[in-house]
Amino acid sequence: MFENKERTDIALLGEFGLIKHLTENFKIRHESSTKGIGDDAAVLNFGDKEVLISTDLLLEGIHFDLAYVPLMHLGYKAVQVNLSDIYAMNGIATQITVSIGLSSKFPLEAVEEIYKGIELACNKFNIDLIGGDTSTSKQGLVISVTSIGYAEKKDICYRNGAGEGDLLCVSGDLGGAYVGLQILEREKLIYLENPNIQPDLEGKDYIIERQLKPEGRRDIVDLLAQMDIVPTSMIDVSDGLASEILHICQQSEKGCTLYEEKIPIDPLTYETARELGLDPTVCALNGGEDYELLFTIKQSDYPKLKHDVDISIIGHITDKNSGCKMISKSDVVHEIQAQGWNAFKF
Ligand code: ADP
Ligand code: MG
């Protein structure tokens, strides 16, 4: 995917030269970042707030395929998916560290593209880059992002707080990232068979973007605060709705009822899934990578968000013995099972 003509050998800069070159444009914006890049460790000060930390590791060939992921998107997505975990705690993300393992085939210009994406994400989501690590890799590209944020103790949402009768809510729409990935995979196969055929992605922008350029839902965290709602539990949808619902129910020791007809699916996701012979509901349940927020609220909070078009109420929490059920559009009761995307399948 990297076709830039210029190819500067990273060895010319050396490790320290590379770090300086990549990070010199990043500004520090938060008072909590006492010391950023440049010493043995960063120094942070959050006063009396609770501190939130989350890490992700992304490996070429396992989590991304450089055949169709542009490097800038990869940098952007690596940051977004990690910030999403802080938002899922109902927190405010403020800092990240970024560690990279680069194979020798990578020229400077390619790493610059990744950092452009990282910078875009930092600017858009108001994040300080405060450190990282840099190494060579023999096994393809490796990116690890750690994000740091904070919240008041009373605002933090764990997975284990759902109560019986609570409403099950989800932001945005689901299944798009998975269906977008199927389109990208299809075009990659066509390209490998005949490199003269241009990829046909026309009209599929929304779902391709859902796959390549997901956005952490900081806006939902802000919106909930404005509405004066603290969810009783929350999780981000990285592995598919089914898997995330089960996490909440298992950790809260509850059951749930989910209504298939209430699951928000964008029309393009729906049509494209059908075109590919896939069930749109299954894509939403098991696809993953949507990075929406799934949360539960007390029924008394319902009037505060019932008019919000970006939040769907898809079911409710029941007692543990009732199990986790989905009522299908034709009124059949199904047991919810997690078949989410799994990085351990070989
Ligand atoms: P050390 O030898 O102590 O690990 P490094 O030379 O790796 O130190 O890093 C020097 C500084 O640059 C540190 O502040 C580190 O956090 C930062 N840094 C290293 N690699 C990266 C990177 N890829 N992105 C951002 N900051 C980095
Ligand atoms: Mg180091």
Image: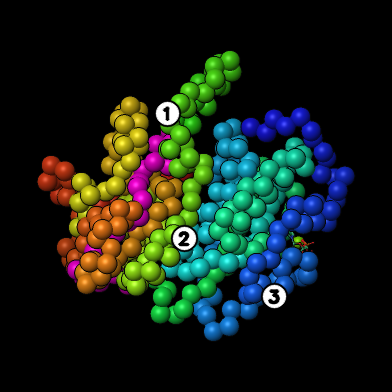
Residue at 59% x, 32% y is 67
Residue at 81% x, 44% y is 10
Residue type beneath disc 2: Arg
Residue underneath mark 3 = 34
The magenta span reads 158-182
Residue type beneath disc 3: Thr
From this viewpoint, is residue 188 visible? yes
Give the percent coordinates (x, y) of residue 305: 28, 63
**CB under 8 Å between callouts 1 and 3?**
no
Disc number at residue 154?
none
Helix, strand or loop at mark 1: loop
Magenta region includes residue 40: no
Helix, strand or loop at mark 3: strand
Give the percent coordinates (x, y) of residue 146: 59, 62
Magenta region includes residue 175: yes
Residue underneath mark 1 = 203
Closer to the camera in the image, 84 or 128:
128
- Ranked by sequence position, the earlier of labels 2 and 1 is 1
Separation (CA) of disc 3 from disc 2: 24 Å
Disc number at residue 218?
2
Separation (CA) of disc 1 from disc 3: 46 Å
Tell me the quadrant of ligand 2.
Answer: bottom right
Mark 2, ligand 1, within 8 Å: the answer is: no
Give the percent coordinates (x, y) of residue 144: 62, 55
Horizontal arrangement in the rendering, residue 322 relative to residue 106 (left or right): left
Is 139 rendered above or below residue 238? Answer: above
Answer with the quarter of the image where residue 237 lies.
Answer: bottom left
Closer to the camera in the image, 95 or 344:
95
